[in-house]
Image: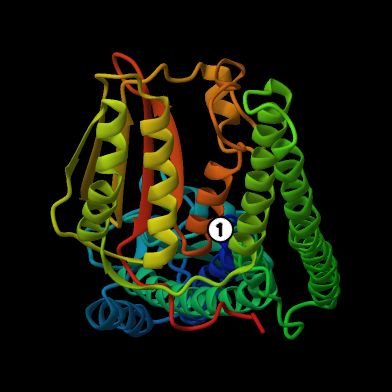
Amino acid sequence: MRTRLLPLLIVLLAAVLLALGIPLAGSLAAAQQQRVVVDRMDDAARFAALAQFVTDGPGGSRRTTTDERRASLRSELESYYDVYGIRAGVFYRNGTEAMANAPGDWFVPRAGEVRRAFDEALLSRRSHDPPQAWPWQHSRLVVASPVIRDGDVVAVVVTDSPTEQLRSRILRGWLVIGAGEIAAMLLAVGAALRLTGWVLKPVRVLDATTHDIATGRLKSRVAVAGGPPELRRLARSFNEMADNVEAVLEQQRAFVADASHQLRNPLAALLLRIELLALELPEDNAEIASVRTEGKRLAQVLDDLLDLALAEHAEADLGLTDIGALAGERVAAWAPAARAKGVSLTGDCPPTTAWADPIALSSALDAVIDNAVKFTPEDGTVEVVVFADGDTTTVVVTDTGPGLTDEELARVGDRFWRSGRHQNVKGSGLGLSITRALLAAGGGSVGFAHHEPRGLRVTVSVPRHPPTAEPTPGAR
């Protein structure tokens, strides 16, 4: 959830910063250019003041000042050009003759930005809004100011400035803004990480605790601390639900165990009375034999129910176990029963270790091998293979029996379930359920699949790594 929520927050924060940063960058560029424009307008106004009394028109028709003033104006323009590299000139209304200019070969062109500024000044207007200079444009900044005498425009002062320094200042300002945006973004991402961590920590703890309960650790609970109030209330509700579920399951287990235990004594007494009754009847009485068989079957069901209740309730005593040696022992223990039935039982059990409860795993393997031998016909084979596979050690038991259909595979392991084709085979239908409970208590699992060309493949897996020593975060 964090990987989905965090990008959304980052995108929103980036959009906000861009929405603020782009106008700020534009405003900075405009402010920098306005400073330059004001400076150039002041210079143009000073030159216009000097040129105001140099009234010598084209062809020298009229003179109101001395040649020294014209020379002084020209000297000012040349010094201005030499120091700042800014072209400047005072041009008569026709634009083709200059009162003074620097450099001396610079005149008002027939078109372009300089001509537009010149024409605007002829209308008695100063340049007030030249096009914005951007860092990626190699442009020039043109400012024009009219020279007015007796209310008439007699000449125009024009300055044509390079914009390298202006563009450099704008770029530096943008870099400062960009650095600020990046710093703000990093700060916002850090805040978003803390915020999402604070909000989602109870969710992660709740997820981990749910997984623990789903895998059989019913004592796990969520610590009701930290996070938003809504999630704290959810944690409390979850703990109440888990307490109720655990109480119901405990009552169910206790009932099964108590019922199994309490029924054994009356059943034993009943079987004893049946044996006493059998002494008074003919030895080959079929009804007595049938009653004996059903009584023993009922006793077996009660024993299995008690074993199942104990398996679901017991805590696994995990330790580093040689799975190969343990599986080899179980193969050797079941070999006589297999030979008596005419079944070949073989084992390939190399040494490999895993974390398991040896007693629980032995019981699980006994149930699986017993089933394989029980349902394999004479001259059939049962193979037990042990191998390490990544994080698990696996014991695979295959047989050449009748196997199961796809529908039966979906139900195998359910309590009291037995295939309709095997109702005449001895058993209670609880053996594989007990196996699954024993393995689940230690973090293991059991799976069922078809074995080609025929038979059943049972896979028992146990973890190779020890369980986490630390408690689940938030558990109590």
* SS at circle 1: helix
Question: Callout 1: few (<14), some (14-19), or many (20+) C-alpha neighbours within 10 Å?
Answer: few
Q: Is residue 47 left or right of residue 126?
A: left
Q: Is residue 409 left or right of residue 276?
A: left
Location of the C terminus by quadrant is bottom right
- In the displayed structure, 433 sits above or below 455; it is below
Task: Determine the residue positioned at 36% across, 72% down.
Answer: 466
Q: Position of residue 231 (x, y in %)?
A: 79, 72
Q: Position of residue 304 (x, y in %)?
A: 62, 50
Q: Which of 27/5 is in front?
A: 5
Looking at the rendering, which quadrant does residue 314 occupy?
bottom right
Looking at the rendering, which quadrant does residue 262 occupy?
bottom right
The residue singled out by tag 1 in the image is 7
Q: Which of 425/116 is in front?
A: 425
Task: Determine the residue positioned at 38% across, 57% down.
Answer: 362
- In the displayed structure, 45 sits above or below 155; it is below
Q: Mark 1 belongs to which amino acid?
A: Pro
Location of the N terminus by quadrant is bottom right
Task: Determine the residue positioned at 33% across, 22% down.
Answer: 451
Q: Which of 282/112 is in front?
A: 282
Q: Which of 259/350 is in front?
A: 259
- In the displayed structure, 197 sits above or below 346; it is below
Q: Is residue 469 left or right of residue 345?
A: right
Q: Is residue 9 left or right of residue 339?
A: right
Q: Is residue 131 visible?
A: no
Q: Position of residue 367 (x, y in %)?
A: 45, 45
Q: How many marks?
A: 1
Q: Position of residue 435 (x, y in %)?
A: 50, 50
- In the displayed structure, 418 sits above or below 114; it is above
Task: Determine the residue positioned at 30% across, 19% down.
Answer: 378
